[in-house]
Amino acid sequence: MADSFSQAARAATNELRQLFEPTPLQRNDHLSAQYGAEIWLKREDLTPVRSYKLRGAFTAMAAVLAQRSDQKVFVCASAGNHAQGVAFACRHFGVTGVIFMPVTTPEQKIAKTRIFGGDNIEIRLVGDYFDDTLAASQGYCAEAGGHFLAPFDDADVILGQASVGVEILDQLGKEPDIVILPVGGGGLSAGLTRLFRETGAASSFRYVEPFGGASLTAALAHGAPETLESVDSFVDGAAVARIGALPFETLKNVAMEHVILSKEDSLCATMIDMLNVEGIVLEPAGALAINALEQIKDQVKGKTVICVTSGGNFDFERLPEVKERAQRFLGRKKYFILRLPQRPGALRDFLGLLGPHDDIARFEYLKKSARNFGSVLIGIETTSPDAFEALFSRLDNAGFVYRDITNDDTVAQFII
C-alpha cells in the first residue's frame, strides 16, 4: 500500500536532516503584543540557502535519483531562490546542474548560486525576460537528456515543501489556530494545506499574495489557473504570472475571503519594521505572512498564529528603495510639484511654512526658463502623516500652488 501524503511528507522531512536541522519556530513578542495573539514565526529564512526552496529541490532530485541513479544532469530556470536550492542539492548529490538565469539577474544572486553549487553547476545567462530564459532551459534540457526541475508545479517539490508543516506540528506540539502562508506558484501553500487536511488538523489557513502578482486570486475567480496580463516584479520571490496546475488542484476550494492581497509598499514597511525592531532580514516575499496580520487583526486576536517567513535573500543595495517606499506608504514622505514665484524672497517664504519636523529630502527645479513662475520638485519627510495636513493648509493659506504626486505612479516613475 502506498504511503499517504502525510507519511511521505514525514519521510521527506527525515531525509532533509542530511542537509539541515529543522528551521526555528519562534514566538515573536513584538508581534504578539501588537496583535494580542500568540504569533510564531517559522523561520524559513534560516535554511542554508535562506529560503524554503531547498526543501522541494532536494526532495524532487532525490525522487528522480531513486528511480534513475544514472541521471546526471538537472536543469532549472530561475533568477532567485529556486536556483540556489537546486545548486545546493546538486552539490549534495554530486550531479551536474545547469541553471538558466535571465541576463538581467543581479550579480549578487548569481554569485550566491555559484557558491552553493560550486563545481557541480553551470550558470547560463539567457534572455532579458524570464519567459525567454525558461524556453531556453527547456530546449537545452531536451537536447542534453536532463531532468527539468520545476520550481512549484511538481508533485515531489510540493511534497518537499510540506516538510515545513511537519516541522511546525512537531515543534508547536499542538495544532495552531491559523497558519499564514505566502503564495507565489503555490508549491508551499499546496504542500501545507494538503498535509494539514490529511492529518485532520483543524487549523485555518490564510494565503497571502502580492497585489501585483495575484495568481491564486485570478485562478479562484476563473476556476482554473489564469495567466496574469502583467506582474509587478518587486516581490520577486512570489510574483508569479500563473499559479501551478498541480498546486491549484489542492487550492481550488480555498475560500476567496481567505486570500489576502498585500500592497508592495506596505511590504516595505513590514521589512523595515522587522529589520529595525527584531534584526530579522526578510526579502519582500518573506514578509508577506507578517504583513497580512494587519488586515486580519480582528481574526487573529487571542489565537495561536503561525507566519511562515519564506525567505531572507535580500540585496541590501535595494534598502534605499525599500525605505523610500515604506515612508511613502506610512504617509511620512511626500513628493509634490510647487509653482514657485520667480521673485526675491519666494523661496524663503516657502521655507518659513515648514513645520519643526518637516525635512526637505529633495529640491529640484524642473523648469528654469519661465519668467514669472518656476516648477520645483520637492520631497519632504516628516514624523507623522498629520504634519502634511498642517503643511498643506499653511501653503493654501499663503496662496502657493502645488500638486501632490506621491501616489501618481505615471508621473512619479519619470520624475521621482
Image (cartoon, grey):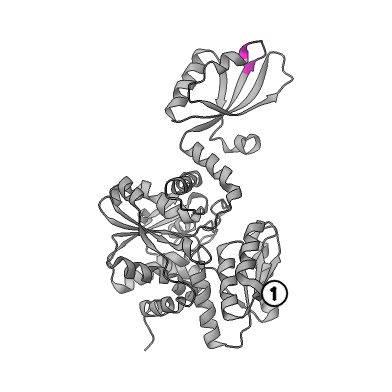
Using the rendered image of the protein, determine whether residue 324 is visible from the camera's viewpoint: yes
In terms of secondary structure, where does tag 1 sit? helix
Q: Is residue 153 visible?
A: no
- Horizontal arrangement in the rendering, residue 302 relative to residue 278 (left or right): left
Q: Residues within 10 Å of mark 1 (few under 14, many from 20)?
A: some
Q: Residue furthest front?
A: 279
**In the picture provided, is 232 more to the left or to the right than 171?**
right
Type of amino acid at the residue the image marks with label 1: Tyr
Farthest-out residue, left: 302
Seen in the image, is 130 located left or right of residue 27? right
Instruction: Name the residue nearer the viewer: 323 or 374.
Output: 323
**Rendered location of residue 380, percent (x, y):** 54, 28
Quadrant for residue 376, please give it: top right
* Residue 103 image point, x, y percent: 70, 59
In the picture as drawn, the residue positioned furthest to the right comes out as 369
Q: Nearer the viewer, residue 119 or 410?
A: 119
The residue depicted at 61 percent of the width and 81 percent of the height is 94
Q: Is residue 12 magenta?
A: no
Q: Is residue 165 left or right of residue 236?
A: left
Q: Is residue 192 above or below residue 362?
A: below
x, y percent for residue 110: 65, 62
Q: In the rendered image, which quarter contains the C terminus? A: top right
> Looking at the image, how many numbered discs can be counted on the residues?
1
Q: Position of residue 363 (x, y in %)?
A: 63, 27
Residue that appears at 51% across and 60% down: 226
Q: Residue at x 38, y 56 (%)?
A: 256
Which residue in the protein does label 1 denote?
140
Q: If the image is split into quadrants, where does the N terminus sit?
A: bottom left
Residue 347 quadrant? top right
Q: What span is colored magenta in the figure?
A: 340-346
